[in-house]
Amino acid sequence: MNRIAQLLTSSNVIVELDATSKKRVFEQVGLLFENALQIKHNQVFDSLFAREKLGSTGLGQGVAIPHGRIKGLRDAAAAFIRMKQPIPFDAPDGRPVSLIFVLLVPEKATDLHLQILSELAQMFSDKNLREGLLTGKDAMGIYQLISDWMPNAPDQH
């Protein structure tokens, strides 16, 4: 199992979210985390939005990884969203985003936070996985795809 699958639960996978903007996505994710982890939805929204103001978390290739620090959160938490329609995300390639992986980390998170973001970037650079995430039929199937993905081992030099 990869590090990402340890953060994500199948109940935090949303397929075909119908929203028209980052703001609406962050509102929906806030409600999801409020129900799952009892974090106030506006705290999630504010954290993600504040990070986004520093620069887009869009990676390109139709993928974004919005992330934020949450005061009082004990362990990193995640959600995966596939949009019903791609939305603008100010990605470097200018393309709209369909695949969104939201990462929340404790306020004082350090290296683990960066390792997770690095693994996510590697995961989403896998063209076959991206295609599978775009065509997966349901949340459980998408969760399984993410769980089964294995990162490349770092060079052993």
Image: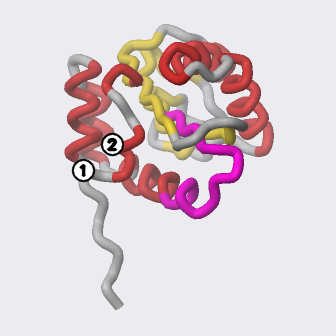
Measured as percent of width and height from the top left, residue 118 is found at: 49, 58
Q: CA distance from mark 1 to mark 2?
A: 6 Å
Q: Answer whether labels 1 and 2 touch (C-beta < 8 Å).
A: yes
Q: In the orientation shown, which residue stands out farthest toward the top?
A: 18
Residue 57, picture quadrant: top right
Residue type pointed to by label 2: Ala
- Label 2 sits on a secondary structure element that is helix
Pick whichever, 142 or 91, lies toward us. 142
Pick whichever, 94 or 87, lies toward us. 87
How many discs mark residues in the rendered view? 2
Q: Is residue 108 magenta?
A: yes
Is 117 on the left-hand or right-hand side of 80?
A: right
Looking at the image, which residue is at 48% across and 38% down? 63
Looking at the image, which residue is at 49% across and 8% down? 18
Residue type pointed to by label 1: Met
Q: Which residue is mark 2?
A: 5
Q: Is residue 35 above or below residue 97?
A: above
Q: Which residue is mark 1?
A: 1
Measured as percent of width and height from the top left, residue 84 is found at: 42, 13
Residue 146, picture quadrant: top left
Measured as percent of width and height from the top left, residue 96 is found at: 54, 29
Where does the C terminus fall, quadrant-wise?
Answer: bottom left
Pick whichever, 127 or 155, lies toward us. 155
Quick check: can you spot residue 68?
A: yes
Specify start and end residues of the magenta stretch as a single range.
101-115
